[in-house]
Structures are given as C-alpha cells and as structure tokens.
C-alpha cells in the first residue's frame, strides 16, 4: 500500500493509503538532523539520532502525517469519510495542544525530558496542529472508536485512554470490544474457561467505559487479511462450515523448567521479562521467581505492576521469596521535581510544556530507570527477577555518554556507579538473562521483533522468547479454537526461523501460569 490514496480492488468508492511509521520517522529524523550535518560534531549528531530513534519519535512523526490528512482540506478533497487507524494517543494530543510554548523553548530545552527532542521539527506547523485538535473535538466531524479486548488489563488501558481524550474535549467516543469468544463445543473445557474469563472481564469493566456506546465483535477463526478476510471477520462466526481438524504440530518449544534449573545452579544474576502490554510478562516473571524459591534459593521479584497483582501471581511470600515494587508514581514525582528544579528560568508557557512532557509515557520509563539500575546492582547475592525492564531504546539512550551519564556525573548522583555499570552487566549473558514475551499472533510477534532490534542496538542479546497463552500444546475441540490453534503455526515458525534460536512455548491456562 502506497502513501497516496489508492483504489482498493473489488470495493467501489474505497481508497486506502498507508502511513508507514518507520518511513515517517526516518523522514522526520532527516528533517530535524540534516541541517546540522557538517556543522556539529559527529558525536553530537549520533546522540541526536539516538534521541530520535525511540517510540516517541514514531508517535510524533506519525502524528505529523496524520495531521496533514486531518486538517488539510486539499489532502482529502473528494472523500466523504476518512477513517484513521490508528489515532494519536491522548498524551501526544495534549502535548501538541500547547503551541504557544514551542517557539524558542523547544530549541533551548536542556532539561533531559523525553518527548521534546522529537518535537523539535514541529514548531513551524502549530496552526495546522491547532486546527487538527479543533476537528478532533468537533462531534459533528469526528468520532473516536476505542478498540479493546475482553481482558481486564486491556479494558483498564482503554479506560485510561478514554479519560485522556475526555480531558481534551474529545467526547464523541465509541467502545468496541473485539475478540469476544463464545464456546460452541460444550465438551471443550478450554473453550468454556476462555468464554468465562472474557465474560468476567466485561462484567468488571471500568465504570468510565460503561457510559460509552458499545459494540462487540466475535473472535475470528482466521486473521482478517484482504477483502475476503474482512468479510469473514465481520460476518457471524457461529457458522464455520466444515469443522477444521487439529493440525499435526512439531512445536514443542524449549523447556522453561530447564531454564529455571540453570538459573538455580548459578545462584545469582538477573532475569528480566520484556514485551508489550497484555502478553503475560508479570505471570512469567512470577512463575520463574516462585519456582526458584521452591528450590530453596533466595529470590527477589521486582516489578512496576500493582503490588496486589504481584502477590496474587507469586503466591505466598517466604523467607526465600521477597517481593518488591518500584512505585512508578513515586519515581516519577522524584524525577519531575529534579527536572523542574533545573528549569527555573522558564516562562509560564515553557513550564507548561515541560510539565506536560513530564507526564508522558516515556517519562515513566526514564523515571524508574535509577531504581531499576539499583536493583540490578544489588543482584550479586541473590537471583533477581524483574518485571518490567526498560526497553532497549531507553537503555541505549541513557547510556549515551553525552546525555544521561554526563548529567548523572555532573550532579554527583550517589547512584552514578549503579547507572554507569548497568549496560556491561546487561550485556553479560552469564549474569543477565532477558526474556522477550509475546503471543502467537501477528502484532505481538512483530512488536517483540522491534523490541529485539532495540536491544541489539544496545549490544544486548535476549536469552530467548516466551510465547505465552498458546493453544498449540492443547487438545482443543471447539471449531473456532482449532482454527486459531492451526493459525499459530505461522507465527511460531516466524519466531524460530527469523528471530530466536530459543523459544519457550507456554500453554493457555485457566488460572494463568501461577
């Protein structure tokens, strides 16, 4: 699909274009950096490129392209409806709703905050962005559709996003719950348990979502690829025709128990579970920590997940198992206070922009970084299992000598040894074992591959991939689950052939891993 509206074969009056986030980010970096080539030292340019290589830049660059379609009447002349997938997050919209503060402040900012670097090339288009925000808040022109799954964590995330958008005056929202499963084979215990879990999550839906108009879409037997796939996706899946037969599978995966035995023999070091939300990082971390403690080893489980969830997952805390929590709110407050204390010369507009940037999702990752570094530093005498670790981009960005290290050393931070010694430890496969968690589905696998690329740039090789909640090892008989089980093979093959030599395959379980 090209970057220009192109007619879709077989569907009258439908045109499509693709905003490629990576291409948009590459063009965005070039626009921001190229004017300085040959003017600034190579080391400075390399640092600029790294600061513009993370998730914030992808988001802001995609927004740049998104805005042109939304607010430039000429770009969509001749079209009655424009449907975007995906809209910007509430944070990006809030950040870009403060255009008065951009002039001068973006260029002069030296506070170390995370999203202002990616914003550096935007200040010349403030009028276009202001127009985009007006259109998004206009109920007669825009409806925002929140897509979620019948899963407690996904519903909480949808509620957070809805709240952010409401704060911006974007009130015309509609909730769609995708992937609602209803068992058709009542003899399949897995199918009945999966249906019950989804119903329980929807019954406990956050109150803020209950006020929204609601639509549900049944779980699809096949991925909605192409026109025919979309027709099947939106059809009633209760009639699947001939029942599919379970495919023969050679997918066994590596033995996670053997991985845990190896850790037990070493008796020290760090295990980290990484991945996007909803792939089971916390449950994998808790299982590893609990099983090590059962073997009599001293173990610390550290997480940014709410403490109650950790204790539920880890089970009873014993002398061997210590559960700690890095409180993001406390770490963010500390980090915000430090940055604002260094920004005493800002005017009111500049301070407003900085305070908004300090509420960004990127800031949470940076704010907990020192606590994370401290945890790794103290992992010499016991095994430490960490959920969730920073991304490779954050590790590499904060390791850059001309950015975070310089600031730490300049301030005389008492924890500078913990920070400066972090990357060498993470690069040591005998000390740090990083597990990338995913699901056997297209988007989670591709997001995990992107994460692995970030880690590679930091010189870190994961110990393996964990495919969680897989149907492949299970003997399911419900026709829809059989189809989805067969579909998993393509993604398991992609992982083992393109991404990792070691894959741990964990089956879907009614009560989770632990």
Image (tube, grey):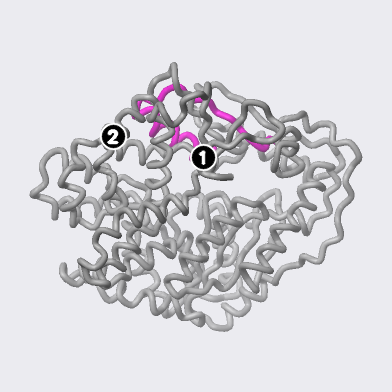
Q: Is residue 1 left or right of residue 480?
A: left
Helix, strand or loop at disc 2?
A: loop
Residue at the image position 71 percent from the left and 36 percent from the top: 227
Answer above or below: position of 52 versus 176: below
Residue 124 appears at what percent x and percent y? Answer: 24, 41
Residue plotted at (58% across, 78% down): 264
Label 1 sits on residue: 4
* Count of number-bearing discs: 2
Name the image quarter holding the N terminus: top right
Left or right: where 46 falls relative to 156: left
| 497 in relation to 114, above or below | below
> Left of 339 or right of it: where is 154?
right
> Few, some or many C-alpha atoms within 10 Å of disc 2 (few <14, some 14-19, many ≥20)?
some
**Residue at x 77% of width, y 57% of height:** 472
Circle on res. 443: none
Q: Residue furthest top?
A: 140
| Residue 228 % position (x, y) | 75, 37
- Between 307 and 208, which is closer to the camera in this rendering? 208
For the C terminus, give its image quadrant.
Answer: bottom right
Magenta extent: 155-180
**C-alpha span from label 1 to label 2:** 27 Å
Q: Nearer the viewer, residue 55 or 318?
A: 55
| Residue at position x 43%, y 65% in the image | 392
Q: Residue 97: which disc?
A: 2
Q: Secondary structure at mark 1?
A: loop
The reply to whether the magenta stretch includes residue 236 is no
């Amino acid at each position: 699909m090209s970057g220009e509206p192109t007619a879709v074969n077989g569907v009258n009056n439908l045109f499509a274009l693709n905003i490629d986030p990576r291409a948009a980010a590459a063009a965005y970096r070039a626009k921001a950096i190229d004017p300085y080539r040959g003017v600034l030292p190579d080391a400075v340019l390399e640092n600029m490129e790294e600061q513009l290589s993370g998730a914030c830049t992808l988001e802001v660059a995609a927004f740049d392209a998104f805005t042109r379609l939304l607010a430039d009447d000429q770009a969509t002349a001749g079209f009655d409806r424009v449907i975007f997938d995906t809209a910007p997050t509430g944070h990006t919209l809030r950040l870009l709703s403060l255009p008065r503060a951009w002039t001068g402040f973006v260029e002069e900012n030296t506070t170390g905050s995370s999203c202002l670097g990616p914003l550096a090339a935007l200040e010349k288009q403030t009028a276009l962005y202001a127009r985009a925000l007006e259109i998004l808040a206009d109920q007669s022109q825009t409806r925002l559709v929140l897509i979620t799954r019948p899963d407690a964590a996904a519903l909480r995330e949808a509620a957070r996003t809805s709240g952010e958008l409401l704060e911006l005056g974007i009130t015309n929202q509609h909730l769609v719950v995708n992937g609602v499963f209803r068992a058709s084979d009542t003899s399949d215990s897995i199918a009945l348990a999966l249906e019950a879990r989804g119903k329980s999550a929807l019954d406990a839906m956050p109150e803020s979502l209950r006020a929204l108009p609601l639509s549900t879409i049944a779980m699809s037997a096949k991925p909605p690829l192409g026109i025919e796939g979309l027709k099947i996706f939106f059809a009633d899946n209760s009639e699947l025709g001939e029942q599919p037969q379970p495919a023969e599978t050679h997918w066994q995966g590596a033995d996670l128990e053997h991985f845990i035995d190896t850790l037990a023999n070493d008796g020290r070091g760090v295990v980290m579970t990484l991945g996007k939300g909803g792939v089971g990082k916390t449950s994998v971390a808790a299982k590893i920590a609990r099983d090590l403690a059962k073997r009599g080893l001293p173990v610390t489980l550290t997480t940014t997940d709410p403490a109650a969830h950790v204790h539920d997952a880890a089970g009873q805390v014993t002398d061997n198992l210590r559960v700690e929590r890095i409180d993001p709110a406390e770490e963010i407050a500390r980090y915000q206070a430090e940055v604002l204390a260094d920004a005493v010369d800002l005017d009111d507009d500049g301070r407003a922009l900085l305070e908004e940037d300090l509420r960004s999702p990127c800031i949470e990752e940076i704010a907990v970084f020192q606590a994370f570094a401290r945890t790794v530093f103290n992992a010499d005498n016991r095994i430490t299992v960490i959920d969730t670790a920073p991304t490779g981009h954050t590790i590499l960005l904060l390791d850059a000598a001309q950015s975070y290290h310089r600031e730490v050393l300049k301030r005389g931070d008492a924890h500078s040894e913990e920070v400066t010694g972090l990357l060498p430890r993470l690069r040591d496969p005998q000390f740090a074992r990083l597990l990338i968690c995913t699901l056997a589905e297209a988007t989670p696998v591709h997001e995990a591959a992107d994460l692995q690329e970030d880690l590679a740039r930091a010189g870190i090789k994961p110990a393996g991939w964990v495919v969680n909640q897989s149907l492949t090892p299970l003997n399911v008989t419900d026709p829809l689950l059989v189809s989805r089980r067969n579909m998993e093979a393509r993604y398991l093959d992609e992982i083992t052939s393109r991404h990792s030599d070691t894959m741990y395959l964990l089956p879907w379980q009614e009560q989770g891993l632990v």
